[in-house]
Image: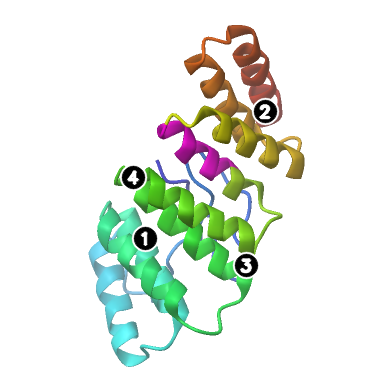
Amino acid sequence: TPASSNGTRAGPAGPGARSCCTSYISAQAPAPCADTDSVCKINTLLKKIQADPKEPENYYNLGLAYQKAGNYKQSADLYSMYVALPGIKPEYLADGYNNRGMMRRMMNQHDLAAQDYTKAMELNPTDPAFASNRGNAYLSLKKYDAAIADYGRAIKIKPTYALAYAGRAHVYMDLGKTAEAVQDFTSAISYDA
C-alpha cells in the first residue's frame, strides 16, 4: 500500500514510512478543499493544468491525488506526463518514475514497475527506497536473485533501512531459508524501532 504523505514538495522525497513503496509528497490544493476531499483536489488540479499545461508540479500533484483516491491507472498516466516534461531536476524526475512504478505494481505490472525503478535508481542512486522497491517488483516476479541483490543495494546505501531487510526476509522465506529470514526480520524490527 502507498506510504503516508510527508509534507509539501519543497525538495526530494524524504524517508517516510514505506512498505512496497517509497515516500511521496502529498498533493497540496488551495484552501477550499478539505484534506480528505479527493474530488475537490482532483478538480482543482485539473483546472491548474488547464491554466498552465507546462507546469510539471501540477501533473505530479494530480498523480498523487489520483493515487490517494485509488485510481492507479489515472495516476500512472499523470506520472507518465510528468516524466515527459522537460526541465525537471533529476531527483524530482526520479520521484516521478518511482511513483509510476508504485502504481504499476498496484496494477500487477511488475516488469514495467521494475523498469521505472531502474530509471529512478539511475537518476538518484543514493535513495535506498528505489533499489528496495525494485527488489519488491522482482520478488513479485519470483526473480529471487535479482530481488536479493537489490535489497543488498538498498542496505549498502543505508545500512539501517528496515524495509530492505524485511523484503529480503520475504525472499528467504519463499526460498525456505528460515534462519536467514529470521535474521533479516530481526534486523528490520530493530532498525524500524
Q: Which residue is mark 4?
A: 106
Above or below residue 154? Residue 76 is below
Q: What is the distance, in whole Å, between disc 1 and disc 3 at their CAs?
A: 27 Å
Q: Which residue is mark 3?
A: 91
Which of labels 2 and 4 is toward the front? 4
Where is residue 123 shown, x and y percent of the image?
Answer: 62, 64
Q: What is the distance, in whole Å, between disc 3 and disc 2 at their CAs?
A: 28 Å
Please state which amino acid type lies under the numbered disc 1: Asp
Which of labels 1 and 2 is toward the front? 2
Residue at disc 2, secondary structure: loop
Q: Would you call the spot at circle 3 few (<14 residues within 10 Å), some (14-19), or many (20 or more)?
A: some
Q: What segment carries the magenta color?
A: 132-141
Which of labels 3 and 2 is toward the front? 3
Q: What is the distance, in whole Å, between disc 4 and disc 1 at their CAs?
A: 23 Å
Q: Is residue 158 visible?
A: no
Circles 4 and 1, Cβ within 8 Å, touching? The answer is no
Residue at disc 1, secondary structure: loop
Mark with earlier residue (2, 4): 4
Please state which amino acid type lies under the numbered disc 3: Glu
Task: Tell me, for residue 193, which label it has, or none.
Answer: 2
Mark with earlier residue (4, 1): 1
Circles 2 and 4, Cβ within 8 Å, touching? The answer is no
Please state which amino acid type lies under the numbered disc 4: Met
